[in-house]
Amino acid sequence: MFNPQTEIKYLTGVGPQRAELLEKEIGVHTFGDMLTYYPYRYVDRSKVYRIAEIDGNMPYVQLVGQIVSMEPIGEGRSRRLVGRFSDGTGFIDLVWFQGLKFVGKAYKVRTRYLIFGKPTVFNGKLQINHPDIETVEENVDIPEIQGNTFRPHYHTTDRMKKGFLASAAVAKLIGNLFKLITEPLPETLSQWIVDEYHLMPYDEAMHNIHFPTSADSLRRAQARLKFDELFYIQLGILRYAMNRKQKQGGLVFQTVGANFNTFYHDHLPFSLTEAQKRVIREIRQDMRAGFQMNRLLQGDVGSGKTLVALLCSLIAIDNGYQVVIMAPTEILAEQHLETIRGLLSGMPQLRIELLTGSVKGKRRKEILDSLIEGKVHILIGTHAVIEDNVQFRNLGLAIIDEQHRFGVAQRAKLWDKRTGMKTPPHVLVMTATPIPRTLAMTLYGDLDVSVIDQLPPGRKPIHTIHQFLKHMDRIHEAMRTELKKGRQIYVVFPLIEDTEKMDLENLEEGYQQMREAFPEYKVSRVHGKLKSAEKDAEMSRFASGETQILVATTVIEVGVNVPNASVMIIMNAERFGLSQLHQLRGRVGRGAEQSYCVLVTKYELSETTRKRIQIMVDSTDGFEIAEADLKLRGPGDLEGTQQSGMAFDLKIANIARDGQILTYARTAAQHLLDTDPTESLPENLTCWKHLSQLHSDINWGAIS
Ligand code: ADP
Ligand code: MG
């Protein structure tokens, strides 16, 4: 009898040693886990080719024949093992660069093998690198092999392979599992959902995902299981959000009063863009609706989020509440303070204070006292504002800038902490890292999203150029032209923990190079290893125009605003993520001049890297760039998502590609919640039961 809870060691063919491997290496503890360990690809094995038919442009092929000779070739890093393989119609080389010892022992000459791999041509000869190899009994003829269609391939680790648990062995275990399944596997969704979305029944999908009977049933099985996965994530998030809204009231900001109006009519230095107006309306709606606002404000670098934050703050203040604005770094917090104090300089009745780690002693105490007395209207700061001893009289609005740098737990702390009131403050999260819609829906399923999709008028798009390192002289020449016009220039180097020492040396070398190449100009240098006072001093030398070139690590990524700096040179651009490049580039293009961004890379680039650099050259649209990044790298790698609460692994769905299914799944989940809010209709029992079993370990609050 099949029971998904049964420990994996009881499966035929497993036993204690393999059980340990399965548990440790791929997290398979039970029969149920094994069943949902899906193949990562399928190979059509309906055809066996002859070597005479093959050329280097073909995709994966399989061949049957013998290895006629096997010998190591080359020295050092190019050392490899080459097996000459023939089926009587021609020869092809099987090549191994790794595991030579193992391969040398495992495969014998004059033995019949089934070879599987991608043919290529090297030095005019056909070869297959690291082929899959299986023994074929002498008495099996080729038509019998050909009957074997759609082989599943499972991810396995090196340790598993050494324990004789390669993909084919895993497939066999799953075959054993299916032998135990004598009854159809029970449906996991309400029947009306299966019907309405034309889904393949669960039992059929499970069989076909492992052992597809045709290309079409494979496709339908995948769609069904992706739907399941995304449906339950959405159901969890939406149910959590609904409960929260029902349980928790929100502050009602009824009035738009004197502060807002005075600022808007008398002090606003320019007119708002239509996009800014729209998002302010959206936020204003939320803040008077009677439930707690949880809104994500997305807007590309330079789209004017600060002004939106300020106008919303004034509404909170008009209703008698305090505001906190949290930034990820001290420099950014200070810059916010400066900007906001500047904008509000005509309204001295409003008190704005800064609280960071550097604010100490008497000054700190004074601010904390004024805060709890309600004399501070806007508190701007870093993580320091969520320390336990910071208490407000009545916090009404919390604004978190560049949220992706804050952990989820920190965000939660904001409304846990003593804010002077029972009702939690409204929360506005601002980010310049555009999160594609599909990802936002999954990660921040219960956050409402506003988008500033328009830049203030008069900005010239930044001109982006790709240049190879060996043409540094051309770059110097172009730099000189801009310096002569009076512009300033950033030169950015990567700094990654793993390669820190080398990275710092590179930066140091780059700094010396700049000083030699431009003796007539002054060069600043800033990196994360400098003391913060030193860093600030160098930074302000550049900001004030005293130095013309700033050699730096990504410490400048968020923060500094130097409108006269119109050129950004990014060294080793291939080592940066796309979103990071986009953020960096956003440091220029802030003044009236034409700005440039030069991406400097080494000459040999992988295909993916070349594509990434090209996207940067072609596009200045942050959303387009983020979508492309997601497609190229997958959601796990997307900057900022690691910390922002990807509390679940997706086994089969892919956020970058399955947006359509996600939309259906979300609609279905919302419909279920709307039509069965008490979770009691008999036809939905399956769904509710499944939800509580599936995700008992996920903290939905942490995700949203
Ligand atoms: P970000 O969205 O990156 O935080 P900022 O709020 O720093 O952008 O705004 C970038 C620049 O654009 C600032 O100098 C700001 O004063 C200016 N700005 C903002 N809104 C407008 C507007 N409606 N018209 C003209 N300039 C604006
Ligand atoms: Mg900003």
Image: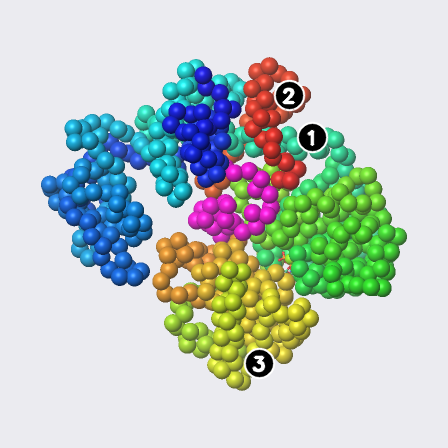
Q: Check mark 2 vs ligand 1: CB closer than 8 Å? yes or no.
A: no
The C terminus sits in image quarter: top right
Is label 1's Cβ within 8 Å of ligand 2? no
The picture quadrant where one finds residue 172 is top left
Q: Which mark is residue 243?
A: 1
Looking at the image, which residue is at 21% across and 38% down? Answer: 113
Residue identifier under label 3:
522
Whether residue 609 is visible: yes
Q: Of label 2 and label 1, which has the lower sequence position?
A: 1
Between 357 and 17, the one lying in front of the other is 17
Determine the secondary structure under disc 2: loop
Query: Which residue is rendered at x = 60% and y = 46% of the image?
Result: 644
Q: Residues within 10 Å of mark 3 (few under 14, many from 20)?
A: some
Residue with the most extreme right position: 373
Q: Which disc number belongs to residue 679?
A: 2
Crowding at label 2, few (<14), some or many (≥20) Cα neighbours within 10 Å? Answer: some
Q: Quadrant of residue 380?
A: bottom right
- What percent of the width, then of the height, locates residue 616? 46, 58
Label 1 CA crowd tier, 10 Å (few <14, some 14–19, many 20+): few
